[in-house]
Image: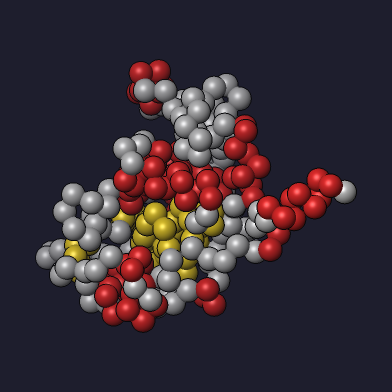
Amino acid sequence: MNALPERLAALIWPRRCPFCGKLLGADAVAGCHCRNCLPEVERLSHDPPRLPATEHEFYAVSGAASAFYYADTVRYAILMCKGHGNPWYARELADLMAVRVFGAQAAPAAAGRPAYTAPGELKPYTLIVPVPPRRPGTGTMPRLLAKRLSRILDIPVAYPLYTTRKMQPQKNLDLNARLRNTRGAYACRRGTDLSGMRVLLVDDIITTGATVSACALALLQGGAVSVFAVSVAAKEDLPPNKRLPKQGQTQEKQSK
């Protein structure tokens, strides 16, 4: 019965592959994307999902994980969700996060959702918190991801964080500037009490770790005992075995 509204919504607004836009049918992989995109999804998967501290500048978070590398078709899906009119892709991307990061059982069909079966007392987190937008009217993707993960993991979602000042766009800054730009720029709303809570912090992309670290520090100051960050993708150098061959190399192989 809980899945009925979701199935009805899928009939009215058919689900699409976030990587190519194709309508998802009975052969959808994990209920999230089309079979044609499976090789790319596997190639760009972040295995294991835990992010190495050597690739990022983490502080305040107890750790971080991402489902994918931020490149190629994954980058396309995130950009389409964030700023090109396809916010519903957050549903499929969150489902893939649940499967790849948390080990949820994939949905059997495109109209369903992954199943997470960990007993309540063994769940590692007590609250899900999305990274807040840097300015009003933007940055809705972390909220959409958090809401979907909340339904899958059966963990409540809350919105205690807000920005305390205007920040520059992170994409235009180097590492040191990103850390200065975000440090102290997030806080918990007045009256927030996170005492004893283990928080799962959700963002769309983790690049240097500056944003999730600044948010985690605010959550710890609000009483949380630990903060673990997750995202759809991490911006890291692709391992050699996951890089696409260069055009010259491809032609050479074909000639042989």
- Of all residues, the one furthest to the left in this rendering is 190
Q: Is residue 193 left or right of residue 217?
A: left
> In the image shown, does 9 or 195 lie closer to the viewer?
9
The N terminus, quarter of image: top left
Looking at the image, residue 36 lies above or below residue 250: above
The residue under the point 30% across, 59% down is 131
Q: Is residue 245 visible?
A: no
Looking at the image, residue 31 lies above or below residue 206: above
Q: Is residue 53 left or right of residue 255?
A: left
The total of numbered circles placed on residues is 0
The residue under the point 51% across, 35% down is 20
Quarter residue 202 falls in: bottom left
Q: Is residue 67 left or right of residue 243?
A: left
Q: Is residue 52 visible?
A: yes
Quarter residue 198 falls in: bottom left
Q: Measuring from the top left, give residue 62's x and y in whole percent.
A: 44, 72
Q: Measuring from the top left, give residue 52's x and y in whole percent.
A: 55, 71
- Of all residues, the one furthest to the right in this rendering is 256
Looking at the image, residue 40 lies above or below residue 68: above
**Colouring method of the image:** secondary structure
Q: Measuring from the top left, give residue 9's x and y in whole percent.
A: 36, 23
Q: Measuring from the top left, give residue 81's x and y in whole percent.
A: 37, 43
> In the image shown, does 252 or 235 lie closer to the viewer?
252
> In the image shown, does 253 or 38 lie closer to the viewer?
253
The residue under the point 37% across, 57% down is 203
The residue under the point 45% across, 44% down is 77
